[in-house]
Image (cartoon, grey):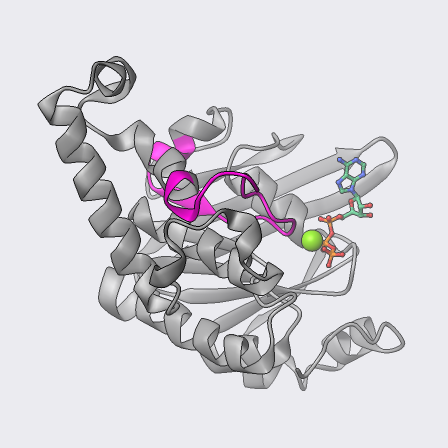
C-alpha cells in the first residue's frame, strides 16, 4: 500500500450511553480512494466529523501523516489540507456560487481580510485568482455558467456538486466526502464518479468517501472500510467486501445500500 496519509488510531466516540464509534483503526494511503460504508447510524458521519475536527474523540487519535489532528480546531485542520463536504447542504442560499466558493478559499489567501476591505491591488489579484480557480473547478461539473447565480437557482443535486467544487478549490490533500451522490440523478452520479477519479489523477487528492450508492463505491474505491454499530467489520477491496458474510448480514433487512 502507498504511504499512510490519514490514519485513525483506536478512535472511540460516545454520545451518552451510545458508543457511535468503537475502537476504529484504519489508514487511508496517499492517493487512495477509500470508501466508508455501513448501514444507517453505523458511525460514518461521526468518523467524518472526528477527522475534520468538528468533534473530538473520547479515546484514540487521528493523524495526517505524522501530524496529530485530534485536538486541533477545524479551521487548522482545514488549513493543513483536510477538506470535507457535509451530508446536509451547507451553501449560503442567497449568495452566488462564486461568493460561496470565495468564502471557503479566503483563509488561504495572502492579502487577508483587511486588505480585501481596502480593495488593494493584492486583494483584487486574489479575487481574480479565486474566480479563475472557481471556474476551473465548476467546469469539472459543467456548472461554470452558474457562477454568478444565487445558490438557490441550482437544483439540490447541482448544489451538492458546487460543494465539491468549493472543496477542491481549497486544493486539499485529503477530501472527506459525506454521501456526495445523495440526491443526484443517474447522469449526475456518472459525472460525480468521473470527478472523484479526476480528484486523484488530476489534483493528487486522497479521498475518504462515505457513500450508500454502491455503484459509486464499487467504481471508484480501492478499498472499503465497513462499519456496523460503530464497529469495523471489514476492510477489503469492494468486490471482496460485498461478498463478505458479515457485511451481507449487516446490510440484510436494512435495505439502505442502493444501486442507483
Ligand atoms: N451529536 C449526536 N448526539 C447524539 N447521538 C449522535 C450524534 N451524532 C450521531 N449520533 C448517533 O451516533 C450513531 C452514528 O451516527 P452517524 O451519523 O455517524 O451514522 P451514519 O453512519 O453517518 O448514518 P447515516 O448513513 O444515516 O448517515 C447514530 O446512532 C446516531 O444517532
Ligand atoms: Mg451519515
Q: Quadrant of residue 127?
A: top left
**9 sits left or right of 13 in the view:** left
Furthest residue in direction left, as rendered = 121
x, y (%) of residue 87?
63, 52
Residue at 12% across, 25% down: 122
Q: Quadrant of residue 249?
A: bottom right
Q: Nearer the viewer, residue 181 or 65?
A: 181
Residue 30 in sight here? no
x, y (%) of residue 96?
44, 43
Q: Quadrant of residue 141?
A: bottom left
Against 236, is 124 above or below? above
Q: Quadrant of the C terminus?
A: bottom right
Please say whether residue 98 is one of the residues in the magenta stretch: yes
Count of numbered circles on the image:
0
Q: Nearer the viewer, residue 128 or 105?
A: 128
Against 255, is 6 above or below? above
Q: Nearer the viewer, residue 155 or 74?
A: 155
**202 sits left or right of 199 in the view:** left
Please say whether residue 67 is one of the residues in the magenta stretch: no
x, y (%) of residue 191?
44, 76
Residue 158 in sight here? yes
Q: Nearer the viewer, residue 152 or 224?
A: 152
Residue at 67% across, 86% down: 243
**147 sits left or right of 73 in the view:** left
- Which contiguous range is marked in magenta? 77-99
Against 259, is 224 above or below? above
Amino acid at each position: 500500500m502507498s504511504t499512510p496519509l490519514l490514519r485513525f488510531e483506536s478512535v472511540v466516540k460516545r454520545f451518552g450511553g451510545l458508543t457511535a464509534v468503537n475502537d476504529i483503526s484504519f489508514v487511508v494511503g496517499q492517493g487512495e480512494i477509500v470508501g466508508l460504508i455501513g448501514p444507517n447510524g453505523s458511525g460514518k458521519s461521526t468518523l467524518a466529523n472526528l477527522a475534520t475536527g468538528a468533534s473530538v474523540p473520547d479515546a484514540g487519535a487521528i493523524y495526517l501523516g505524522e501530524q496529530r489532528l485530534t485536538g486541533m480546531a477545524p479551521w487548522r485542520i482545514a488549513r493543513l489540507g483536510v477538506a470535507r463536504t457535509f451530508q446536509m447542504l451547507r451553501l449560503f442560499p442567497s449568495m452566488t456560487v462564486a461568493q460561496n466558493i470565495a468564502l471557503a478559499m479566503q483563509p488561504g489567501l495572502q492579502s487577508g481580510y483587511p486588505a480585501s476591505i481596502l480593495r488593494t491591488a493584492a486583494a483584487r489579484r486574489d479575487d481574480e485568482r479565486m474566480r479563475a480557480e472557481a471556474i476551473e473547478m465548476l467546469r469539472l461539473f459543467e456548472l461554470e455558467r452558474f457562477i454568478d447565480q444565487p445558490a438557490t437557482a441550482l437544483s439540490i443535486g447541482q448544489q451538492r456538486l458546487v460543494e465539491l467544487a468549493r472543496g477542491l478549490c481549497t486544493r486539499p490533500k485529503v477530501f472527506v466526502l459525506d454521501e456526495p451522490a445523495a440526491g443526484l440523478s443517474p447522469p449526475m452520479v456518472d459525472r460525480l464518479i468521473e470527478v472523484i477519479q479526476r480528484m486523484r489523477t488530476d489534483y493528487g487528492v486522497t479521498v475518504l468517501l462515505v457513500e450508500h450508492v454502491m455503484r459509486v463505491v464499487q467504481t471508484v474505491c480501492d478499498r472499503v472500510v465497513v462499519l456496523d454499530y460503530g464497529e469495523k467489520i471489514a476492510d477489503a477491496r469492494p468486490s471482496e467486501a460485498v461478498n463478505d458474510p458479515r457485511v451481507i448480514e449487516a446490510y440484510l433487512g436494512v435495505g439502505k445500500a442502493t444501486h442507483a
